[in-house]
Amino acid sequence: MTNHTWHVGELKITKLFEQIFSLPAVKLYPEVTEEQLQHFADGMTRESPLAMSVHSWLVESPQGRFLIDTATGNGKSRPFSPMFDQLNSPWMDNFLATGLRPEDIDYVLHTHLHTDHVGWNTRWDGERWVATFPNARWVIPEGEIAWYQTPESVPRAIIFADSVQPLIEAGKVATITDNGGEYLPGIHFLPTHGHSISHMSIAFASAGQIALFTGDVMHSKLQVSHPELASVFCRDKTAAHHARTWLFDYAIKHQATLFTVHFSGSAVGQLSPAGEGAIWTEM
């Protein structure tokens, strides 16, 4: 798949595709109604498939080269999720097609630590998992790391063990507090908790413009017009709803360009106000 690139201020932003899969609308959004789906697309039912993409964002800026999340990774054991288990995806080929090499990445910024956002952090060197991007600094919300130390995390412990712990042991990880804040000039972590315990969105300000990386605040465009819908993957549905409406207001106020993770199509767009939700204009 050809890489697609956008420019926001002085930022060059490239989508690094991994895979597309689909889920029935009712499986992704258990509370979705036929009426909501009919407004979204004629002929849709609760059993109709919703396509979802998995990809990362590469940001090239005057401050360095950044990855925003790192998709699922290849060859990783994910027995709890067949769609992510032992992948053999083109993600690394797509990364190399940008002309960069893994050693060129300066920072990896994480919105959260779910399996489809951390996998390319590490690679197997024949003996152990090591940093894929050897010169990078990882920045992770501290609550995301803390959650993996709790009994609740045990069914997903393998994610942390192969894709995060090796980086911590190598001294490559910095944390951002759960209140968010500015990490580098113009780069802000914005608390949008709910999907996960300390989920963040990340805003880059450049030359008077804002690029807003939404993480999993939304999983499909259906939630733009119906922000009250929470996905089956969200830990705290009420908090996730509040995070979406807050992010909509922020994006509209700042005329931000949104870079989503799971939207089909370009996954890039802008929002304009419309009642309880918003209108998505794809870019």
Image (cartoon, rainbow, N blue to C red):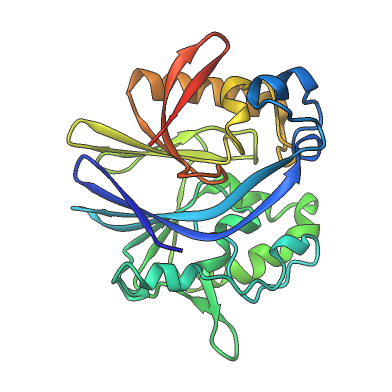
Q: Quadrant of the C terminus?
A: top left
Left or right placement of residue 63 versus residue 22 in this view: left
Q: Is residue 62 above or below residue 98?
A: above
Q: Is residue 177 above or below residue 239?
A: below
Query: Residue 64 location, x and y as percent?
Result: 25, 58
Which of the two residues, 55 or 2, is positioned nearer the viewer here?
2
User: Residue at point 33% right, 66% down?
Assistant: 105
User: Residue at point 55% right, 42% down?
Assistant: 263
Which of the two residues, 168 or 40, is positioned nearer the viewer here?
40
Q: Is residue 254 above or below residue 176?
A: above
Left or right placement of residue 86 versus residue 27 in this view: left
User: Residue at point 65% right, 27% down?
Assistant: 41
Q: Quadrant of residue 143?
A: top right
Query: Residue 158 location, x and y as percent?
Result: 71, 67
Left or right placement of residue 260 versus residue 113 in this view: left
Q: Count every numbered label the image shows and give the total.
A: 0
Query: Residue 76 location, x and y as percent?
Result: 66, 73
Q: Residue furthest bottom?
A: 126
Q: Residue furthest top?
A: 275
Query: Residue 30 location, x and y as percent?
Result: 81, 32
